[in-house]
Amino acid sequence: SYELAQPPSVSVSPGQTATLPCSGDRLGEKSACWYQHNPGQSPVLVIYHDTKRPSGIPERFSGSKSGNTATLTISGTQPMDEADYYCQTWDSDTGVFGPGTKVTVL
Amino acid sequence: QVQLQESGPGLVKPSETLSLTCTVSGDSINSYYWSWIRQPPGKGLEWIGFIYYSGSTIFNPSLKSRVTISVDRSKNQFSLKMSAVIAADTAVYYCARGRYSSGWYFDFWGRGTLVTVSS
């Protein structure tokens, strides 16, 4: 089955940039999206179609892709951005989520 | 604003059938795709399946043999049934709206409901 890889954790100081990678076989040929998830709350879509930001999502969230690695970048990270972040794609008509990266804002 | 709300029993016995309903407000269910996703305690998200308002479905192959998703257009609801549950099916179950842009994504989610499988 298809798998996505994400680092388990990333630490960032307030105001700095957090870079979250997500890699997978042939991910360059697929569309990737990203969700922010705080425990006990609904996941929130922050990026879809690799780079598109839904309305209402702050501009400090951006997405990119190079080769088979998609990247979520949080510029000027704020304490409220501390959460789990999941990448997601599709393979053979199956939705696949990455294992998630916990972002800690120190 | 689209809102989704999951409902159903929070406790299911092993080997029995888990049944959940998602009520959609702020949008008609007669468009888009509607999905179930779950998160076991301490683990990541797992996609369960999709239903289109017409009734066509797509399932995660790992769960396909045990899962049914149906839609009730008159009530603006869709439902999940998972048979022969085991402890590993204990999870927070989310319903979500699916959209497509060179790939599927989920733009609105419910708050989730915890289902525990235990005798």
Image (cartoon, rainbow, N blue to C red):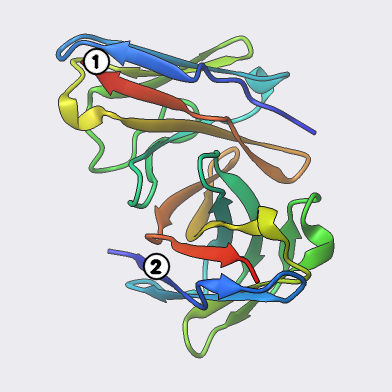
From the viewer's perspective, tell me whether residue A53 is left or right of residue A20: left
Read off the chain for label 1.
A
Q: Is residue B56 above or below residue A30?
A: below
Residue A69: quarter of image? top right
Please tell me which residue is depicted at 75% across the width and 30% down the height of the picture: A2
Secondary structure under the numbered disc 2 in the rendered image: strand
Which residue lies under the disc numbered 2? Answer: B4
**Quadrant of the frame with the C terminus of chain B:** bottom right
In the rendered structure, find residue A75 and report the number of the disc placed on it.
1
Mark 1 belongs to which amino acid? Ser
Picture coordinates of residue B39, whole percent (x, y): 54, 49
Picture coordinates of residue A15, whole percent (x, y): 15, 12
Residue B4: quarter of image? bottom left
Q: Is residue B73 above or below residue B14?
A: below
Read off the chain for label 2.
B
Please tell me which residue is depicted at 48% across the width and 49% down the height of the picture: B106
Q: For the residues tagged 2 and 1, is the chain the same?
A: no
Please tell me which residue is depicted at 40% across the width and 55% down the height of the picture: B108
Mark 2 belongs to which amino acid? Leu
Please tell me which residue is depicted at 64% across the width and 60% down the height of the picture: B50
In the rendered structure, find residue B45 and report the number of the disc placed on it.
none
Picture coordinates of residue B44, whole percent (x, y): 55, 39
Residue at mark 2 to residue at mark 1: CA–CA distance: 31 Å
From the viewer's perspective, tell me whether residue A89 is left or right of residue A20: right
Q: Is residue A64 above or below residue B7?
A: above
